[in-house]
Image (tube, grey):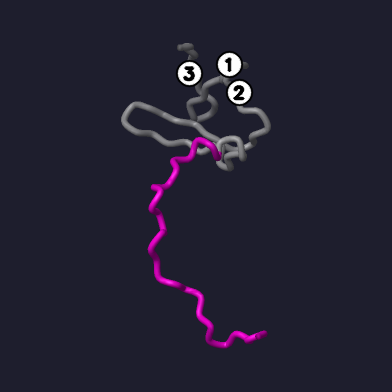
Amino acid sequence: MKTVSIFKNGKNQAVRLPKEMQFEGVSELEITKYGDVITLRPTRPDWLSFKDVEKSDKDFLTERESIILDEGRFNFD
């Protein structure tokens, strides 16, 4: 775990991220606070982070109502 200091930037608090923790190619971050934990993450995750998204259950959408209607469609038979 690394420790950094907090400093004032105008009326805001700021922190400098160590080089090894900097966000590459990111211009905007999302910030959330839960209790005393503050999390920063890119607002637009790249495709590499897609693998980290929780997978759905195997039976997700196996039984569902059809939402495609034949009404108004051409029959090419």
The residue at which mark 1 appears reads as 18
Q: Are marks 2 and 1 in contact (CB under 8 Å)?
A: yes
The residue at which mark 2 appears reads as 22
The part of the chain drawn in magenta is 50-77
Give the amino acid at mark 2: Gln
Residue 7 spot, x, y in % from top left: 50, 19
Residue 61 colored in magenta in the image: yes
> What kind of element bears circle 2?
loop
Up-down relation of residue 69 to residue 18 (above or below): below
- CA gap between label 3 and label 2 equals 16 Å
Crowd class of label 3 (few under 14; some 14 to 19; many from 20; radius 10 Å):
few
Which quarter shows the N terminus? top left
Give the amino acid at mark 1: Pro
- CA gap between label 2 and label 1 equals 6 Å
Residue 18 spot, x, y in % from top left: 58, 16
Up-down relation of residue 71 to residue 50 (above or below): below
The residue at which mark 3 appears reads as 6
Which quarter shows the C terminus? bottom right
Residue 54 colored in magenta in the image: yes
